[in-house]
Amino acid sequence: MRKYHLKQSTGIALLALSIGYTSISKAHEASAVMGEQADFLGYATVTCGGSSTHFEAAVKDLSGPVAGLQVNLQIIKGSIADSTTDPVSGDLDFSPYARVDGGAGTYQLLVNKTAVGARAFEVSYHCKLDNGLPGGEHTETDIVVRQFWSLNN
């Protein structure tokens, strides 16, 4: 049990450091490692500033390919949701972006996986304003990690 808590704490610390670093650099990317359990879940809330029209995010599985093991990402705001999956593990490409047009406010961001096995991953997340420019304009983006573990140890 102690070994699990150490891995869990290490993962949370790495995610928190990544998020802290990216907040300084404005890159809006964070990476961490999900534990072995199939039901391991990363859950964060992202708050988009007042001029935001939408929130988008993509996930990149940094681990080597394992049959039947993929990393998924979901975005939820109110009754609107979207999801994406990295189709090729370890290829250094992000999944297609999931997008929810929910304006300013708080979005739920979840990252999970499809089977047992540790997975290193990276998330790219952005609050944006549709302003006619390609890709839109970045707006204020704040993230808080709420859960990063398996509920069923």
Image: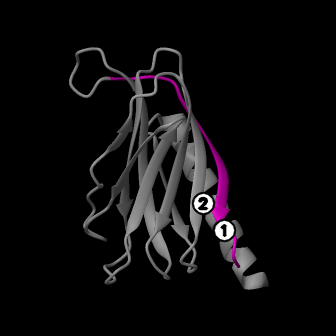
Of helix, strand and loop, which one carries label 1?
helix
Q: Amino acid at mark 1?
A: Thr
**Percent from the top left, x then y, of residue 85?**
34, 60
Task: Look at mark 2 in the image and give the residue it sits on.
Answer: 14
Q: Which residues are magenta?
A: 137-153
Residue in view at x 52 percent, y 53 percent: 110
Q: Is residue 7 left or right of residue 5?
A: left
Counting every numbered tag in the picture gives 2
Q: Is residue 99 left or right of residue 80?
A: left
**Percent from the top left, x then y, of residue 118?**
50, 78
| Tag 1 near tag 2, CB within 8 Å | yes
Q: Is residue 145 magenta?
A: yes
Q: Is residue 120 magenta?
A: no
For marks 1 and 2, give the CA distance.
6 Å
Q: Quadrant of residue 57 in the image? A: top left
Q: Is residue 49 left or right of residue 148?
A: left
Q: Is residue 146 above or below residue 11?
A: above
Task: Look at mark 1 in the image and give the residue it sits on.
Answer: 10
Residue in view at x 40 percent, y 66 percent: 71
Which of the image's four quarters has the C terminus? bottom right
Q: Is residue 85 above or below residue 54?
A: below
| CA neighbours of label 1 inside 10 A, class few (<14), some (14 to 19), many (20+) | some
Task: Tell me the chief SS of the magenta region.
Answer: strand
Residues 78 and 41: in front is 78
**Percent from the top left, x then y, of residue 49?**
53, 21
Residue 104 disc label? none
